[in-house]
Image: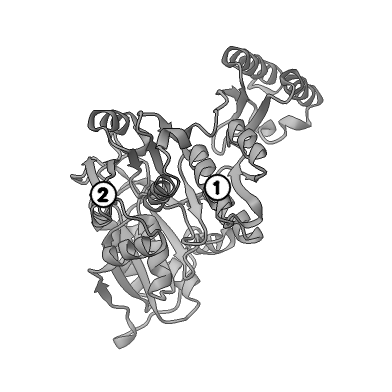
């Protein structure tokens, strides 16, 4: 991974790390690499951060300086931009958002013309221009300079798209919703009401800095409380750009991404729509989901952590459902990225079509406890821990101790001299002690001197 682009675009504190000067250069370089000289337009959306206007102006100038038009769709969820890029036949889409991060952060993420996140090779090409200050000779003049257009019907187009693929009537249902003062603050409650449901929404008054502030999908306690107080049928909580969701059943219990995969995967399978009877998860997927899917005759394929890796596997093999515990869920028949609102509507669809309460569906999977500890290691060994025979043997010994009812997962940190030790199993005390012992074992052999 390059020095600018992380797993989800360029991100940093706005006007300090992510400056308007950098946004302008990203716009120029991105437009140059993605368009390959083709004319056309770029769809540009953002979340509710105060810095969004500043970065949009700079990014737009950069894109237009390369002869591409910019169609601004305003405050809108990330998955909407992925969809609208395809619908409007744009050469690319761009989102200005820092997802679940605090309000002072912001980010820039590109989509290709087919609504997919850019491959590493394309991001590296853009980075090469930026980091090595390569000159882009293209300087369109006169009427070849890009123009800016304001699209006022983008939110409506996105809502109509969702209603066309998830045909449900929510009459008689009450939905609690935490919009996190983010991109879904207006669209989310609107679509529930347009589908006939009653919505009780909180955190719908963004002020530019309160996005994700002790609310939304990273603070599900708020929607849990709201569901119970309002006797709602389902609770939905979103992050800042609404590409992820945490749901809550009518008893106030969390429905995380693993449980959503079980609920929606079982339903799709019953309808004969689960391609190859397979769901895509990650190495962090809870063993409880594995065990449940096994009883249903459904397979699970696991990738590295990150929705881009899930999507790559889905595209390669033709799978239609994948996601991760944090609430990034991809329904590939409908969109090319995680979509929190679509996922919430799919959950409501299963509730309506099966006639089951959310708590009954939520009980399909029994979570195994997971514990996570960090081992401080010499950076030279961060990626080589399993090449140390003693460590490899110790991991095998611990897993054999669980007799198929637990597992060990060790992952290097992307930025720090750490390896993360996760152990999962039925006995919380046993796995906690085993994880702490393994951390000490690893540090004694490859720890910082």
Where is residue 389 drawn, in percent x and y?
Answer: 81, 26
Placement of 446 over or under 45, stated as above or below: above
Please state which of residues 182 and 40 is positioned toward the viewer in this rendering.
182
Query: Would you call the spot at circle 2 few (<14 residues within 10 Å), some (14-19), or many (20 or more)?
Result: some
Label 1: which secondary element: helix
Query: Would you call the spot at circle 1 few (<14 residues within 10 Å), some (14-19), or many (20 or more)?
Result: many
- Relative horizontal placement of residue 446, taking residue 142 as reference (left or right): right
- Relative horizontal placement of residue 367, taking residue 86 as reference (left or right): right
Please give the residue where the numbered disc 2 appears in the rendered image: 197
- Relative horizontal placement of residue 380, taking residue 151 as reference (left or right): right
Q: Residue at x 25, y 44 (%)?
A: 181
Q: Earlier in the sequence, mark 2 or mark 1?
A: 2
Please give the residue where the numbered disc 1 appears in the rendered image: 265
Q: What is the quadrant of residue 78 in the picture?
A: bottom left
Q: Residue furthest bottom?
A: 143
Q: What is the quadrant of residue 121 in the picture?
A: bottom right
Which quadrant does the C terminus fall into?
top right
Placement of 95 over or under 288, stated as above or below: below
The mark total stands at: 2
Label 2 and label 1: CA atoms lie apart by 24 Å
Where is residue 231 drawn, in percent x and y?
Answer: 26, 32
Where is residue 316 drawn, in percent x and y?
Answer: 65, 60
Please say if the residues under marks 2 and 1 sit with CB atoms less than 8 Å apart: no
Q: Residue at x 65, y 14 (%)?
A: 437
Where is residue 136 drawn, in percent x and y?
Answer: 46, 73
């Amino acid at each position: 991974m390059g020095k600018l682009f992380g797993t989800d675009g360029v991100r940093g504190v706005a006007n300090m790390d992510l400056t308007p000067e950098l946004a302008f250069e990203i716009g120029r370089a991105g437009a140059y690499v993605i368009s390959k000289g083709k004319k056309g337009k770029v769809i540009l959306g953002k979340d509710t951060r105060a810095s969004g206007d500043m970065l949009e102006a700079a990014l737009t100038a950069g894109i237009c300086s390369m002869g591409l038009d910019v169609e601004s769709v305003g405050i809108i969820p990330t998955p909407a931009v992925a969809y609208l890029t395809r619908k409007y036949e744009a050469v690319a889409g761009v989102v200005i958002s820092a997802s679940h991060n605090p309000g002072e952060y912001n980010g820039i993420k590109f989509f290709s013309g087919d609504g997919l996140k850019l491959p590493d090779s394309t991001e590296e090409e853009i980075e090469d221009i930026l980091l090595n200050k390569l000159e882009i000779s293209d300087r369109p003049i006169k009427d070849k300079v890009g123009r800016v257009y304001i699209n006022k019907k983008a939110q409506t187009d996105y809502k109509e798209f969702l209603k066309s693929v998830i045909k449900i009537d929510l009459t008689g249902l009450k939905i609690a919703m935490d919009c996190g003062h983010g991109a879904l603050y207006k669209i989310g409650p609107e679509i529930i009401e347009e589908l006939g449901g009653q919505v009780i929404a909180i955190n719908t008054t963004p002020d530019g800095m309160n996005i994700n502030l002790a609310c939304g999908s990273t603070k599900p306690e708020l929607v849990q409380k709201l569901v119970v107080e309002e006797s709602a049928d389902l609770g939905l909580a979103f992050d800042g750009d609404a590409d992820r969701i945490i749901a809550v059943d009518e008893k106030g219990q969390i429905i995380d991404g693993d449980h959503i995969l079980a609920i929606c995967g079982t339903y799709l399978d019953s309808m004969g729509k689960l391609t190859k009877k397979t769901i895509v998860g990650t190495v962090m997927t809870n063993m409880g989901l594995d065990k449940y899917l096994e009883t249903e005759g459904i397979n699970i394929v696991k990738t590295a952590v990150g929705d881009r890796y899930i999507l790559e596997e889905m595209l390669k093999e033709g799978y239609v459902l994948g996601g991760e515990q944090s609430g990034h869920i991809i329904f590939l028949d409908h969109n090319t990225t995680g979509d929190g609102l679509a996922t919430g509507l799919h959950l409501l669809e299963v509730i309506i079509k099966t006639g089951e309460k959310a708590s009954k569906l939520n009980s399909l999977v029994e979570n195994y406890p997971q514990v996570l500890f960090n081992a401080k290691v010499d950076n030279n060994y961060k990626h080589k821990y399993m090449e140390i025979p003693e460590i490899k043997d110790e991991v095998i010994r611990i897993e054999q101790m669980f007799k198929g009812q637990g597992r060990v997962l060790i992952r290097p940190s992307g930025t720090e001299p750490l390896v993360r030790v996760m152990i999962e199993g039925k006995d919380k005390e046993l796995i906690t002690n085993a994880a702490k012992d393994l951390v000490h074992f690893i540090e004694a052999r490859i720890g910082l001197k």
